[in-house]
Structure formats: structure tokens, C-alpha cells
Image (cartoon, rainbow, N blue to C red):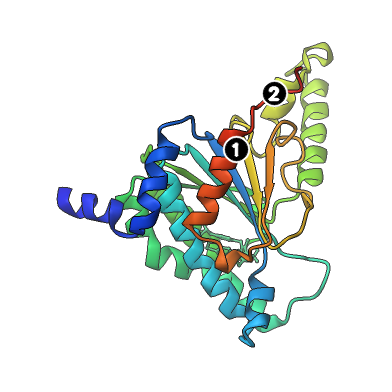
Amino acid sequence: MFYKKLFNKQSSIPESIKERMELVKSQAVPDHVAIIMDGNGRWAKSRALPRIAGHHEGMKVVRKIAILANNIGIQTLTLFAFSTENWKRPKSEVDYLMKLPAEFLDIYLPELIDNNVKVQVIGEKEKIPSHTLLVVEKAIERTKNNNGLLLNFALNYGSRSEIIMAIKNIVKDIKCGNINERDINEDIFSQYLMTKDLADPDLLIRTSGEIRLSNFMLWQSAYTELWFTDCLWPDFDEGHFLDAIEQYQKRSRRFGGI
Ligand SMILES: CC(C)Oc1ccc(CN(CCC(N)=O)C(=O)c2cnn(Cc3ccccc3)c2-c2ccc3sccc3c2)cc1
């Protein structure tokens, strides 16, 4: 088991990356990295492939980046599968997407468990079909005692609705006397968000050239370093991820101070 673990840990990381990894690990790595994974559709279109091929490729990148993040000591990796809800996805694509989580977990959960990765989700789980929710809950259950990387998927997550929900729950708690209006501050408010006691992201990465937050973790990213790349998610690799971490380490971080 030990050799399997050892082999597993290093097996999937290219030689060229290992050097850069050691350098990155020698300095403070961000505790919490969030990624808006965007570009699957465009990637498929540019190769005259069906859109679901982009999603399939995108899933492999999730595994690659999760393994690397775990190896360099990042505590939390929050992944937001950006989907432009505003246009109607073809039914075949929606059906495929709803099956993708089960496929992802079937293929990669054993390796994630081997690497001590803990799987969690934030978002309105109610809207996820029950069969998908079942496999997700099982993955959460099977990894709940792991203490390596927290791999956090944002499902059907919208920041503004998260804030409205928090306000409604605060009003409810004031009405039934659980909290007092004058006690409300940023810490109390944060506890009512879906991210609860998760630390704010230190670094937010967005792929595919869009320079927008798209209603993702708006409250939590108040002091987050933003890093954008034209690279489409399926083309995103360990090198790009380390580029972002190295850039983060170079930027002197001020929390709005001088
Ligand atoms: C614990 C985890 C494994 O389980 C879940 C994970 C996500 C969801 C929600 N979900 C799928 C259903 C939906 N809402 O569309 C998306 O967010 C969504 C929208 N586009 N893509 C394609 C895509 C794939 C890869 C990268 C970006 C987008 C995905 C998607 C589907 C399956 C996987 S697996 C790893 C990432 C990922 C992303 C439900 C359960």
C-alpha cells in the first residue's frame, strides 16, 4: 500500500513540473485557490468536436490540477464549472453533464482517496438530480476523514442568491431571538454564507479569456488575487497552474493597506 501511495502521489506529475513544484513549495503557497473553469465548449468547437468532448477533457484537467494542488500543499481548491445558464443547452449535453459527476467519481475517486483528498460541495444541491446527488454524497462520505486537499465543487452556485439567502436567515434568527441586530458583523455574516467557515480564496483563476467574476464568490473574493488566462480549461495544465501560483507569490499582498 505504501509503495502504491508513493507511486500514486508522484506518478501523474511530469518531470519538468517537479522542479517548479519544489520551488513553489519553498515559499508560502495560497491556502485557498478558486478556479472558474471556462472554455470547454470553445475548445471542442475549435477542434470540430462535440461540446461534450470538451467537458470530458475538462474533467481530466480537474483530476490533474487536484493532484498537483494536493502535492504542493494547497489546503482548499474550489472549482466552479462556469456554465452560461442564459442560453439553452441542448438536452443531450445536459443529460451528459448530469452523468459526468458519476463518471468522474467512478474513475478518479479511488486515486483522490489514495491522495488523502477530501471532497465537498457548496451550492444549491436540491437542483442536482437525485442519482447525481447520491454519488456526490457517497464521495463526501468516503472522503470525510481525509485531511489532505479539500476539493470543493461549487454546484449551481450563485453569489447574489447566496447573499440574499444569508440575509433572510439572519432576519429569521433576529426575529426568533437567536442573534441580536447589533451583533451582526462581517464574521457573523460570513457564517450565513454557503462557504460558512471556509477561508476566503487567496487566489482566483479564470480560464478562457473572460475577465469577469460571473457572480462567483463575490463576498469571499473581496481581497482575492485575480489571475486570468486565455487558455481554455481543457488546455489548462500543471504549468499554467504553477504560473498562477508563482505570480501570486510574486505579488506583494496588501489587504487594502498602504
Ligand atoms: C463532486 C463532483 C464530482 O460532482 C459534481 C460536480 C459538478 C456538478 C455540477 N455540474 C454538472 C451538472 C450541471 N450543473 O451542469 C457542473 O457544475 C458542470 C457544469 N459543466 N460541467 C462540465 C465541466 C467539466 C469540467 C470542467 C468544467 C465544466 C460540469 C461538471 C460536471 C461534472 C464534473 S466532475 C468534475 C468537474 C465537473 C464539472 C455536480 C456534481
Instruction: Name the kind of residue labelled 1 in the image.
Output: Tyr
Instruction: Name the kind of residue labelled 2 in the image.
Output: Arg
Q: Is residue 109 above or below residue 97?
A: above
Residue occupying the point 62% across, 35% down:
202
Q: Is mark 2 within 8 Å of ligand 1?
A: no
The picture places residue 165, in percent across and down from the top left corner, at 78, 39
Image quarter for ligand 1 equals bottom right
**Label drawn at residue 248:** 1
Spatial CA distance of label 2 from label 1 is 12 Å
Front-most of residues 80 and 105: 80
Question: Residue 14 falls in which quadrant of the image?
Answer: bottom left
Question: Residue 108 falls in which quadrant of the image?
Answer: bottom left
Q: Is residue 189 above or below residue 57?
A: above
The picture places residue 60, in percent across and down from the top left corner, at 47, 67
**Label drawn at residue 254:** 2
Residue occupying the point 53% across, 74% down:
56
Front-most of residues 140 and 60: 60
Q: Is residue 108 left or right of residue 31?
A: left
| Local secondary structure at mark 1 | helix
Question: Residue 44 falls in which quadrant of the image?
Answer: bottom right
> Label 2 neighbourhood size at 10 Å, few (<14), some (14-19), many (20+)?
few
The picture places residue 212, in percent across and down from the top left corner, at 79, 52
Q: Is residue 1 visible?
A: no
Q: Are marks 2 and 1 in contact (CB under 8 Å)?
A: no
Residue occupying the point 57% across, 79% down:
53
Residue occupying the point 64% across, 88% down:
48
The picture places residue 135, in percent across and down from the top left corner, at 47, 61
| Local secondary structure at mark 2 | loop
> Label 1 neighbourhood size at 10 Å, few (<14), some (14-19), many (20+)?
many
Of callouts 2 and 1, which one flags the residue occurring earlier in the amino acid sequence? Answer: 1
